[in-house]
Image (cartoon, rainbow, N blue to C red):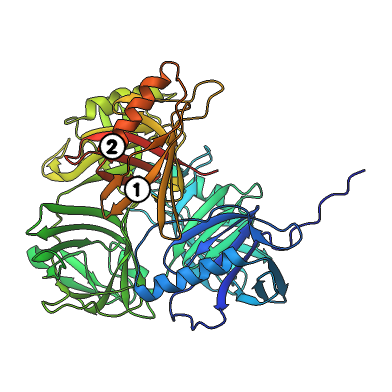
Amino acid sequence: MTADPAPDPLDDTAWVLESMPGRTLLAGVPVTLRFEEGRVSGSDGCNRYGAPYRTDGGFRLAGSMVTTQMACSAEAMAQAAAYADALRRARAARIDGERLVLADERAATLATFAAQPELLAGTSWRVTGYNNGRQAVVSPLSETELTIVFGADGRVNGSSGCNRYTGTYDTQRRGVQFGPLASTKKACVDPKGVMEQESAFLATLRTAARVRVEGDRLELRRADRAIAVVASAASEERAARAHVPGPGTVAVPAAGGAAVAVGTHGLRLPATFRGDLPCVDCEAVRHHLDLWPDQVFHLRRTWIGLDRTFDDVGQWRLDPARHVLVLQGGTEMPLQFEILGPDRLRLIDTIGHARASPGGNELASVGKLTPTDLTLNLGGELTYFADAARFTECLTGRSYPVALEGDFAALERAYLAAIKEPGAPLYVTFEGSIVDRPRMEGGGTERTVVVNRYINVWPEERCERARADASLSNTYWRIVRLGADPVSALHGRREPHVILRLMDGTASYSATVGCNSLAGGYAVDGPVIRFSPAATTRMACPAPLDDWERRLGEVLQSASRWKITANTLELADAQGRPLALLVAVYL
């Protein structure tokens, strides 16, 4: 009879780095470590990371560490590298009360951690996603707010989008149980679907059994580990999100007679901030930053003197301890601005230092919102019924009507072929623009999405999973298309894929379509990528693998540009023409 394996004492624990021998940790740059179901994950103070681990006779990583690829200050990157080295060298892990110690093979301490506090009492949260009861985690409707406030007395309350609710909660180690929830009885008709959202949110809240807190993010999961609710930390600045000024805000007339609010964060919103910031290899980088009180931002940056424009959308948050605005967008590293006043922002680096700027490093506003048009790769959920299409963008949760122009016909055909019932939501990716268009009904204009170039539909994807961008390096990329033609694994063959590895400063790739193996090196400089000529085995390949392999070689030779949208990677030539589409697969 085989004895059951001993339980893993590390499983389902979370920690914050406290010390590393010989190194002074940076203030305000938390490094986190979580053990869950045989994997470690967390933040190294700059990027997110993850890796498998095992505890047979000690502790060690059991595979390559995968990280995102954001750039940070030299100090933060050096600390992250030292931390990653400590994790790779660790051969023992022991828990001493509220401390975790990682040690090397000679029992020398590599790092010590304090237990990650995951108390709910006295915390407030803004919901960014909830399980709608139909096996999907969706964002709250535009113009609604879902909140959770955990009182120190064991009571919970908040907004469910239309009504206020209240009830009780009970916590145990990394667990939570909600008692009956009562709510007010107001009926709301705007926006459409708000009452259905309220019912689904309260129902999924009652299913929560597990708690996960990391930084300013909260996850409530069901007993089967499926996500029930995802939320971000709320604080005093949340009052600025209200449609009317709340406590701590002052109504201020804006240009054109519109009302804006100066919140406790000190900003007068909604507003547009503009300025030309220094550039290493051009005249300046012109910034157009649109900020809304619901924590959405749109950003256009233009490199003056170069043929380069970058558009981004995402959510902003406030770091109240430093009075800093943090912009977290799609594929770019977070940008940070010190709030100098209601209409002034100053660019700073990740550890709070003002960036060197002989020509100035400030953005200014005149207290008026003048949204800019944007063009970028978009990922989100599309619904289409009775010649009316609507798109919910994942990073911001904003919902837009879709113009039936441009490359919409290609997107429509793919949508109709993929859905199982009329009007069902479907995750899609495309290159698009957010612009003003005449309203379908009534006068005036509204922000509308235009599909410039269809990319793909992803029936198994949802917004919640797609919010975190994949890393270019140390990721397994399954090939979805070569040119316009789909490819897939053939029976008994490996699936077509490319693996980009970055280890100890060396960048290499391996690839196959299911026949020969191709290998070489690659280099990345911003949006530019170059692959070295491939070394390959010489087996004869049956059709269609022979054609796919030839075309993959041509893609690697011609690729010049790369772009990641959520967990999809596009390779393009120097003129921006798409060559291949790949999707991240997490093993």
Residue 178 vertical placement versus 204 (above, below): below
Residue type, mark 1 in image:
Tyr
How many numbered discs sit on the rendered protein?
2
Q: Earlier in the sequence, mark 2 or mark 1?
A: 1
User: In the image, what residue occupies the spot 68% across and 59% down?
Assistant: 11
Residue 83 vertical placement versus 329 (above, below): below
- Residue 125, percent from left and from top: 47, 64
Relative placement, left or right, of 27 versus 413 is right
Residue located beneath label 2 in the image? 557
Residue located beneath label 1 in the image? 522
Q: Can residue 498 be seen at all in this image of the molecule?
A: no
| Near-viewer residue (116 or 560) | 560
Residue contact at pointers 2 and 1, CB within 8 angstroms? no
Tell me the quarter of the image containing the C terminus: top right
Tell me the quarter of the image containing the N terminus: top right
Residue type, mark 2 in image:
Gln
Relative placement, left or right, of 82 versus 574 is right
- Residue 46, percent from left and from top: 41, 67
| Near-viewer residue (412 or 438) | 412
Furthest toward the top, the residue is 543
- Residue 273, percent from left and from top: 16, 67
Disc number for residue 154? none
> Which image quarter: residue 266?
bottom left
Q: Can residue 459 be seen at all in this image of the molecule?
A: yes
User: In the image, what residue occupies the spot 17% across and 75% down?
Assistant: 361
- Residue 259, percent from left and from top: 17, 66
Relative placement, left or right, of 293 versus 303 is right
Few, some or many C-alpha atoms within 10 Å of disc 1 (few <14, some 14-19, many ≥20)? Answer: some
